[in-house]
Amino acid sequence: MRLRNITGSREAIAESPYVVQEALQPECPGTWSKMFGNENPIHIEIGMGKGKFIHTMAREHPGINYVGIEKYSSVLLRALQKMEKEELPNLKFLRMDAEDIVKVFGPGEVDRIYLNFSDPWPKDRHAKRRLPSRQFLERYGQILKQDGQLEFKTDNRELFDFAVEELEPAGWTAQVITYDLHHDEDLMQGNVMTEYEEKFSALGNPIYKYVISAGNQARSKRAFDFT
Ligand code: SAM
């Protein structure tokens, strides 16, 4: 999703109290509980778009701290506008490329990661830019807690098949895989629809979802990198 450049969006983000401005400073990792002022679990959405999912999640789960991450200012601005209408103390935002995620969160600082309707990057040579790629899984493994989980939803079958194939080589284990989320009564409990999910399920597209946890490889890599 890339909205046309909205004049002043960068400035609005730079001044917003809802955006963590100093996130890429070396002292940021390990300080999220302090920033939120409590020890509640931290859940992040990477590539959140206009923020409907994470804003709803934060409202419904006040005992969890949420961080919404988006690369483009013009898109993030929409999420900030939602916060201006309904301020939530357990929701913060970052404007950044997820490639830098390990510079922002410390080892094991995050309890859950959401990827929703990530950009497909269909060309083979761009595979490592896909957010569920093994290169990104390796980064996620560094910031997730030992028993942390990652949830991924999409209506793009090629991207989903790719994401499932990436799990084993990256050392992750699938806990749940569905090829028709919206017809699974159990998995639909508590499901919060994203903007893209509303749009594509209304067209009749099935929604694919997995829930995975970091396996031994990711853990030993983490131990190797940070101990
Ligand atoms: N998650 C939302 C939803 O389901 O409605 C938006 C989906 S949209 C297709 C993907 C979003 O991910 C876009 O807003 C895009 O700018 C963002 N994005 C893609 N790659 C990213 C990256 N490397 N870091 C941060 N955001 C990224």
Image (cartoon, grey):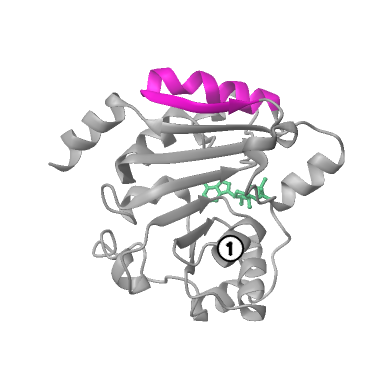
Q: Which residues are magenta?
A: 157-178
Report the side of 215 relative to 128 (left or right).
Answer: left
Mark 1 residue CB less than 8 A from any atom of ligand 1: no
> Is residue 114 in the magenta section?
no
> Is residue 172 in the magenta section?
yes
Give x and y (percent) for residue 186: 64, 36
Residue 123 visible at all: no
Residue 65, picture quadrant: bottom left
Of 216 and 79, nearer the camera is: 216
Give x and y (percent) for residue 211: 51, 34
Residue at (47% x, 28% y) in the render: 175
Residue at (45% x, 54% y) in the render: 43
Of 180 and 114, nearer the camera is: 180
In the picture, the quarter occupied by the C terminus is top left
Element at label 1 = helix
Looking at the image, which residue sits at the far left?
Answer: 227
Residue at (44% x, 61% y) in the render: 64
